[in-house]
Amino acid sequence: MRRKIAAGNWKMNGLTASLTELDTLAARFPKPGCDVLICPPATLIAPAKARAGSIAIGGQDCHTGVSGAHTGDVSAEMLADIGASHVIVGHSERRDDHGESSELIEAKAEAAWRAGLTAVICIGESLAQREAGETLDVLTEQLAQSTPDGATAANTVIAYEPVWAIGTGKVPTLAQIGEVHDALRGQLEARFGAEGTGIRLLYGGSVKPSNAAEIFAVSNVDGALVGGASLKADDFGGIISALEAA
Ligand code: PGA
């Protein structure tokens, strides 16, 4: 059985005062029935970790190097040093805003492992790719190229996030989500064997308390990566509860 994960990505949102949302979650879920992960902006990782209870804290990106002359970048080792256990790599906003390639994301996932972090590797098709019938081909290539050899159930989580569903309120049909997750599972098992069976597959893109339960019932959906609805403890708490019940 794969333990399910409710992961929140705060993106470039949150000041110190926002940590009260985390306090509320930590108090509501002292022993959650699924893994709970919050990825706040890098500025809040250390204070978040200090008050997160059994909620894991992660980064949203990392550099491939350990240290050096890379102004503004943060290494995986630095994230680990301040209490992160996970790091998101390859989010579509990084791929788009910063031109990140799957090859770079693969190197970032290896950097995460080097630092002892679990890599949450994101993949997803654009609307044009979906409408052109290219979804599975695009995802197959992104998954193959973004995931390093050596991926295990412990060091890797995959998040399928259709780019057109992120922050838009649009969600694929349950059949579309299931088709993708089943295909990704098959690909992971073909490449990684039993570890591929254990790697958790998250769905992301406009997940809310109101649609979480039906998404969590889809085959090979092991949880969610949540953006907007992770910012408020009430909303994210509803999603965690739906996952605990799934
Ligand atoms: P959203 O973002 O939940 O706001 O659609 C998801 C994500 O980008 O991880």
Image (cartoon, helix red, strand yellow):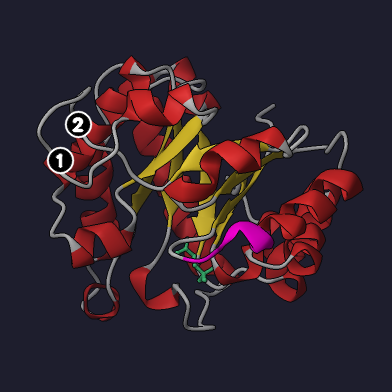
Q: Position of residue 227 (x, y in %)?
A: 54, 65
Mark 2: few, some, or many residues within 10 Å (few <14, many ≥20)? many
Q: Position of residue 240 (x, y in %)?
A: 77, 53
The quadrant where residue 208 appears: bottom right
Tell me the residue that label 1 is attached to. 104
Is 240 placed above or below 185 here? below
Q: Confirm or deny contact between disc 2 and disc 1 (CB under 8 A).
A: yes
* Residue 120, numbered label: none
The magenta region covers: 13-18
Mark 1: few, some, or many residues within 10 Å (few <14, many ≥20)? some
**Residue visible at 56% across and 62% down?**
15
Q: Position of residue 238 (x, y in %)?
A: 81, 63
**Residue visible at 83% across and 55% down?**
24
Residue in front for this viewpoint, 193 or 149 = 149
Residue in front for this viewpoint, 172 or 57 = 57
Tell me the residue that label 2 is attached to. 64
Work out how far the residue at label 2 is from the one at label 1, CA to CA, in angstroms.
Answer: 8 Å
Q: Position of residue 41 (x, y in %)?
A: 47, 53
The amino acid pointed to by label 2 is: Thr
